[in-house]
Amino acid sequence: MKNRCGLERMLVVLALPWFVASCGKVEVASTGDKSNSAITAQTPTVPVAAVQEKQLNKTSKLPGELVAYRNVGLYPKVAGFVKWLGVDRGSIVKKGQLIVKLEAPEMVAQKNQAGQNAGAAETGEIESERRWRAAKAQTIEAKAKQASDVLTYQRMKEASIAYPGAVVRNEVDIAEQTAASSKAHATAAQELESAAQAEVTSSKKRAHAAANSAQGVRQMEEYLNIYAPFDGVITERNIDEGSFVSAPTGTGTTSTPMLRVQQVTALRLVVAVPESDTPGIIQGNIVKFSVPALGKKTFDGTIKRIGHALDMKTRTMPVEIDVLNADGELEPGMYPEVLWPTQKKLVSLFVPASAVVTNTERRFVVRVKDGIIDWVDVKTGATMDDLIEVDGALRAGDSVAVKASDQLRSGSKVTTRLDTGENTYNSN
């Protein structure tokens, strides 16, 4: 009996490892089922957003520069010494105001000589006209005598023919010679009159030239006076009384001006607009801007002049905005921050800015269709809020990964959820 019990205990002990092993296999099988579920659970969940179709309408902050509406450096037209200086830096001037007087002693001598020449030429013209009138009177007298002598000769000739012996033949010959002599005197008088008339024409030309020369000298003398070309302020002074100044030579001179006057009651705000922000520029639109030196105060101006051409180096287009500055609060040379409006007439596709991946090889978005990742190459454009304009093989409504990266490999299977968190679904 005892042997039987011992045998049963031995069988139980021998069977225990097999039982334990069998139980272990069952546990392993159970663990394998859980592993399959874990593999399914490890499929990445990617937040996605829909590609949106919008019209670009945004405001960008662009740097600008304020410049004077008109900015002119004043140079002398003739050489001379500064006799009088009526302005200084900061002086307010009006258009036509005399601001500088120059003196040139040699110009006084030229003026006197030109005046004498003009007077002499005028006297010569008067004298030539007197001689012409005298020659003309002689011509008239000579022609009258010629007519009388010719008539006397004709009458005596007719009488000698009609009444032979009534007129002595010698008297007829004398009358004929007298008529011929009168004709010669009349011809000579006519020639003298023509010569006198030509002299009158010549003397008039000399008088006119002398008068023009005198006028030119007087005009040159007027160049010694410098006037303000427009209402403005003197912003630069480089001369003093007694300074010698001379006219610049050649074109594109870089010499220093005597004075510089700027119109500051109106200013030009010059903005270099990037290529991506040029669409929608409308002449006449109001643009707002601020100046850091004046705090948060905002100003506005009107778009007046558009460059219509991009700078090849910076890829920007210059645009000028007219700004009224009647109170003088703004100054030329300030660098404002411009709130530049950008609009497009046509709609574009937009995705979240974080949806665009850029690496050394390409720029793309991660599109998810039916749970499968697909890389779509795009070109980017303007930004609007947290969206960026894209151009590629996309359509409005396509799902793209919001937080895209090149770790989301093309062809991989993922689970997606809307970035709003409202909907979560699995893609098979």
Image (cartoon, rainbow, N blue to C red):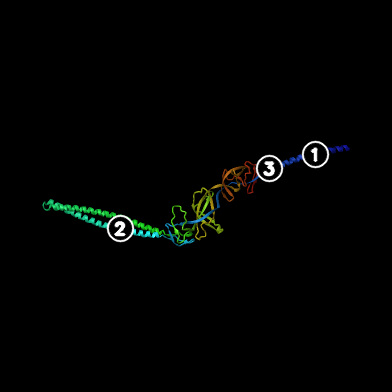
Q: Nearer the viewer, residue 167 or 105?
A: 105
Give whichever of 363, 212 is nearer the camera: 212
Residue 182 placed where, x, y %? 20, 54
Kindly state the secondary structure of the residue where label 2 is placed. Answer: helix
Q: Quadrant of residue 106?
A: bottom left
Query: Could you tell whether 235 is left or right of 374 in the image?
Result: left
Q: Which residue is mark 3?
A: 40
Q: Residue furthest left?
A: 165
> Element type at marker 1?
helix
Alpha carbon separation for disc pair 2 and 1: 153 Å
Check the image and name the residue furthest to the right: 1
Label 2 belongs to which residue?
A: 124
Q: Residue at x 88, y 37 (%)?
A: 3
Residue 402 as seen in the image, left or right of residue 82: right
Q: Secondary structure at mark 3?
A: helix
* Other-residue count near label 2 (Cα within 10 Å), few / some / many at <14 / 14–19 / ≥20: some
Q: Amino acid at mark 3?
A: Thr
Q: Nearer the viewer, residue 173 or 4?
A: 173
Numbered tag placed on residue 379 in the rendering: none
